[in-house]
Image (cartoon, rainbow, N blue to C red):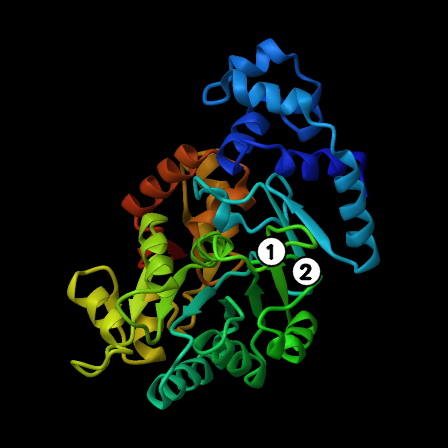
């Protein structure tokens, strides 16, 4: 563990400094240690920081908690993921309120090419269970990472179905990695750590308090390509997650239910108000996301391309490595600015070299 981790953890513990402020400071100072070593006057001049937050940073002296957390991380082989790390979920980076630091126990790639988040009620019906299991079973051949919140109901069903069909699955927690909530899912969580992972922004000894669940939901919504709502009432965390998904420009889908069924009111509401697209199963999802399995056209066409800029060549080289690539992955792998990637993609589309698919997916023509 590097010395910088001490300051990274400490930055998340400073009173009055949330993720938005922490990321603003990192953008200016480059790393967490430099934030703590900055002069008070300079900190005060950072937009959004001001005197109160600058004083909080300069007065912070609870580095023992950071040291304790590092000991916990090392003991249980947990991977800390700071927002500047390459293994940090890149789909989260562009979410304005994404966590500055995550804790991960698992073995799957959080930046794999296809990720879905499956959410729904804790009190599912047999219909919801059947639909969820069938959906994930039909996705078994697509090498999709399944994200959910490890709660009772649809979350648990989604995780179990993923494991049954040999799909990696990650549970996002509303507490530290030193406990599992609900406790009945301890065995499931153990399986997931071996065939997927457990992820949280909370340090150890953090309880699953009520205010932590909406924060958990923003990670569920932000780190995927598509949010799928299986079954939910008119109120609850699933609708919050769907709303967050829309705010993050994610594709949001919902399974329709019977009129008057309280467990389907939320899904029907999302569809009726154009907050989610209706899907009846995996085929609809794959088609709308552009994930349908088709053999790519021979990629030797690139040899015929002429007058391409360096940025365009960089984008093409990434697209040739796999059938379809999410725009966040293009940002990450190209090391180009978002505007440079957008300009390159526009020119390549105009030349008929690259096609834009639903879900901010791009592929070679």
Q: Which residue is mark 1?
A: 200
Mark seen at residue 254: none
Question: Does the residue at mark 2 contact the one at mark 1 (Cβ under 8 Å)?
Answer: yes
Residue position for label 2: 177
Q: Residue 300 at x, y = what percent?
A: 48, 58
Please tell me which residue lies in front, 80 or 350: 80
Q: Earlier in the sequence, mark 2 or mark 1?
A: 2
* Residue 124: % across, % down: 38, 82
Q: Quadrant of residue 309?
A: top left
Nearer to the camera, 164 or 347: 164
Using a 10 Å C-alpha cutoff, classify the residue at mark 1 as few (fewer than 14 neighbours), some (14 to 19) or many (20 or more): many
Q: Name the residue: 45% across, 78% down.
A: 153
The residue most toward the top is 41
Rendering coords of residue 120 (x, y %):
38, 72
Q: Quadrant of residue 335?
A: top right
Residues 78 and 235: in front is 235
Q: Secondary structure at mark 2?
A: loop
Query: Which quarter of the picture shows residue 65?
Result: top right
Where's the C terminus, which quadrant? bottom left
Q: Is residue 38 above or below residue 182?
A: above
How far across and how far down the image is residue 116, in percent? Answer: 44, 66
């Amino acid at each position: 563990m590097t010395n910088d981790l001490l300051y990274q953890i400490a930055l998340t513990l400073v009173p009055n400094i949330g993720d938005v402020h922490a990321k603003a400071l990192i953008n200016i100072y480059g790393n967490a240690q430099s934030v703590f070593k900055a002069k008070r006057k300079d900190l005060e001049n950072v937009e959004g920081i001001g005197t109160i937050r600058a004083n909080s940073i300069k007065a912070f002296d609870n580095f023992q908690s950071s040291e304790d957390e590092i000991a916990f991380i090392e003991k249980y082989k947990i991977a800390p993921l700071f927002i500047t790390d390459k293994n940090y979920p890149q789909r989260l980076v562009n979410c304005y309120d994404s966590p500055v630091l995550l804790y991960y126990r698992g073995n799957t790639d959080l930046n794999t090419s296809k990720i879905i988040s499956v959410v729904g009620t804790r009190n599912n019906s047999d219909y919801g269970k059947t639909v969820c299991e069938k959906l994930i079973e039909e996705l078994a051949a697509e090498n999709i990472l399944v994200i959910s919140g490890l709660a009772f109901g649809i979350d648990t069903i989604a995780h179990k179905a993923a494991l049954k069909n040999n799909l990696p699955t990650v549970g996002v927690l509303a507490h530290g990695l030193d406990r599992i909530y609900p406790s009945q899912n301890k065995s499931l969580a153990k399986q997931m750590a071996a065939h997927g992972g457990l992820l949280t922004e909370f340090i150890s000894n953090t309880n699953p308090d009520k205010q932590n669940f909406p924060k958990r939901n923003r990670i569920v919504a932000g780190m995927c390509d598509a949010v799928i709502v299986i079954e939910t009432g008119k109120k609850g965390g699933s609708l919050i997650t769907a709303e967050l998904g829309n705010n993050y420009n994610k594709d949001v889908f919902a399974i329709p239910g019977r009129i008057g069924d309280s467990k389907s009111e939320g899904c029907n509401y999302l569809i009726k108000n154009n907050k989610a697209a209706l899907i009846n199963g995996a085929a609809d999802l794959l088609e709308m996301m552009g994930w349908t399995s088709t053999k790519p056209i021979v990629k030797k066409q690139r040899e015929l391309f002429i007058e391409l800029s360096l940025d365009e060549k960089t984008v093409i080289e990434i697209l040739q490595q796999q059938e379809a690539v999410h725009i966040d992955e293009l940002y990450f792998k190209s090391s180009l600015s978002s505007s440079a990637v957008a300009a390159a993609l526009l020119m390549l589309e105009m030349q008929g070299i690259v096609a834009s698919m639903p879900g901010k997916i791009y592929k070679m023509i």
